Image: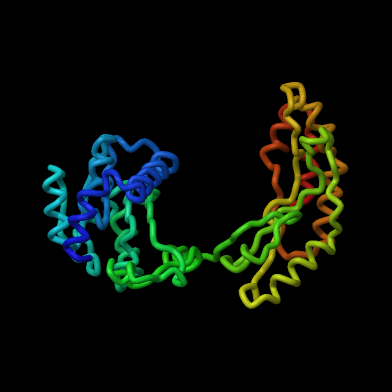
Amino acid sequence: MEIKLIEEMFHQEKTLWWHVAKRKAAKTFLKQYGGPIAGKKILDIGCGTGAMMEDLTVLEADVYGLDGSSEAVGFCQRRNLKNIRLGNLERSLPFFNNFFSAITCLDVLEHITSDEKLLAEIYRILKPGGFLVISVPAYQIFWTYWDEMLGHKRRYLLRSLVKKLDPKRPIVITDSGEWGLWADAIASADILGSSVYRKAYNSNLHVYMPYPFPAAYYQMKANLVTKLPAGKNKKVIITELQSEPWLAMTSPEDSTPQKQSQAFSVKEFRDNIEFVKKIGFEENYLWGVEWWYFMAKNGYPQYLDFAKTIF
């Protein structure tokens, strides 16, 4: 990145909405999924002029910064930040294995020639069970003059980024079996997962209503999307077969075990199993195991007993 742009970032990143919103999102993800921040060793890769490091310091994290620009490191020092290192992000990172509890890497990967190598280094220095927050520019079709000015090598699709993060396992993306079109979901997935619900509560009419879709409806949708160029030779499975009630929850009385047994009977459970067999997909996953256990503990063991006959 040009020096004048780094200086501009130093003066703007504390107030410009783009930088402010990006840091806020990163901190939200860290708190929500990574747990408490205070006391954790957190590395900001491509720390730039240090605003993210400053925010994490305020949250009492043990913050480290790494950047490939000496000018950027100089601006971090002007913010009186500590633990800042100048390093080549194209090479091995200057940290021990399993050193950090969390790492942020915001708008950095697109600058790196070998982004897969950097990701491998991130895995090396991140503790098992550690948390990684990444942001990247999306969609090559949005490439502009500014990408070149900022030194970008590429833009990303969700699928391509996830594959770089974890190339060994397939990507499963789910969509509504009843209302989803499936085309967008299967384009980004290796495996498309569909829900199958047979009865749901209509909050407008205040009644439980059965879905009218036959098994052939799901078969037809699978046949169509797997013939599209983006869905060719991909698998469709059921990731959420209704095996518990869709509760109305309009009052506490609606959630008693007795009411729940009336909202979803063992016969309906059995019928749903037979229905999914007619759909004919190779893999089917049931949604409701914790509910069967809850009901068994509250005087209705028949759901768990029937489930035991399935597996």
**Residue 167 or 310: which is nearer the viewer?**
167
**Residue 155 or 66: which is nearer the viewer?**
155
Question: Quarter-wise, where is residue 187 in the image?
Answer: bottom right
- Position of residue 210 relative to residue 174, above or below, is above
Q: Is residue 207 left or right of residue 297?
A: right
Q: Position of residue 155 (x, y in %)?
A: 40, 68
Total labels: the figure holds 0
Q: Is residue 89 left or right of residue 103?
A: left
- Position of residue 235 relative to residue 209, above or below, is below
Q: Tell me if residue 130 can be seen.
A: no
Q: Residue at x 71, y 29 (%)?
A: 297
Q: Position of residue 165 (x, y in %)?
A: 42, 63
Q: Position of residue 196 (x, y in %)?
A: 75, 53
**Residue 213 or 124: which is nearer the viewer?**
213
Q: Residue at x 44, y 68 (%)?
A: 142
- Where, quadrant-wise, is the N terminus in this rendering? bottom left
Q: Residue at x 40, y 62 (%)?
A: 137
Q: Is residue 267 left or right of residue 311?
A: right
- Position of residue 175 relative to residue 227, above or below, is above
Q: Residue at x 58, y 66 (%)?
A: 189
Q: Tell me if residue 76 can be seen.
A: yes
